[in-house]
C-alpha cells in the first residue's frame, strides 16, 4: 500500500487519522504506521481501509493519487 496514496485518500475523505482508525476498527497507532509506510496491512484490513475511503484496494496500491 502506498503511504502517500493512503494519506491522500484519508485527506480527500475529510477524516482525521483517529476517525479513520475507528471506522476501520484498528488502533490509531496502527493506522499511523500504515500511513507512514512502516507496515503493510493484511488483506482484510486493506479491504476495510478501501471501503472506509470509498475506493478500491487496487487504487490504494497504485502509483498515483489521481486514480482515487
Image (cartoon, rainbow, N blue to C red):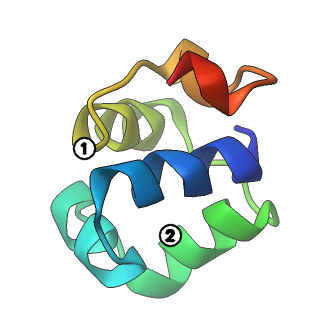
Q: Residue at x 47, y 37 (%)?
A: 46
Q: In the image, is 62 to the left or to the right of 14? A: right
Q: Residue at x 41, y 83 (%)?
A: 28
* Residue indicated by mark 2: 31
Circle 1 packing at 10 Å, graded few (<14), some (14-19), many (20+), is: some
In the rendered view, tell whether residue 11 sits above or below residue 43. below
Q: Residue at x 58, y 17 (%)?
A: 67
Task: Place residue 15 in its image quadrant.
Answer: bottom left
- Spot occupied by residue 35 in the image (x, y as percentages of width and height): 65, 64
* Residue indicated by mark 1: 52
Circle 2 packing at 10 Å, graded few (<14), some (14-19), many (20+), is: many
Q: In the image, is 10 to the left or to the right of 38? A: left
- Spot occupied by residue 21 in the image (x, y as percentages of width and height): 32, 70
- Mark 2 or mark 1: which comes first in sequence? 2
- Counting every numbered tag in the picture gives 2
**For this rendering, which residue is in front, 10 or 23?**
10
Task: Place residue 42 in its image quadrant.
Answer: top right
Task: Place residue 37 in its image quadrant.
Answer: bottom right
Cα separation, mark 2 vs mark 1, equals 12 Å
Amino acid at each position: 500500500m502506498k503511504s502517500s496514496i493512503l494519506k491522500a485518500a484519508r485527506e480527500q475523505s475529510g477524516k482525521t487519522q483517529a476517525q479513520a482508525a475507528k471506522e476501520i476498527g484498528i488502533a490509531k497507532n496502527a493506522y499511523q504506521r500504515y500511513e507512514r509506510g512502516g507496515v503493510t496491512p493484511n488483506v482484510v484490513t486493506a479491504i476495510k481501509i478501501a471501503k472506509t475511503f470509498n475506493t478500491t484496494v487496487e487504487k490504494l496500491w497504485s502509483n498515483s493519487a489521481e486514480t482515487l
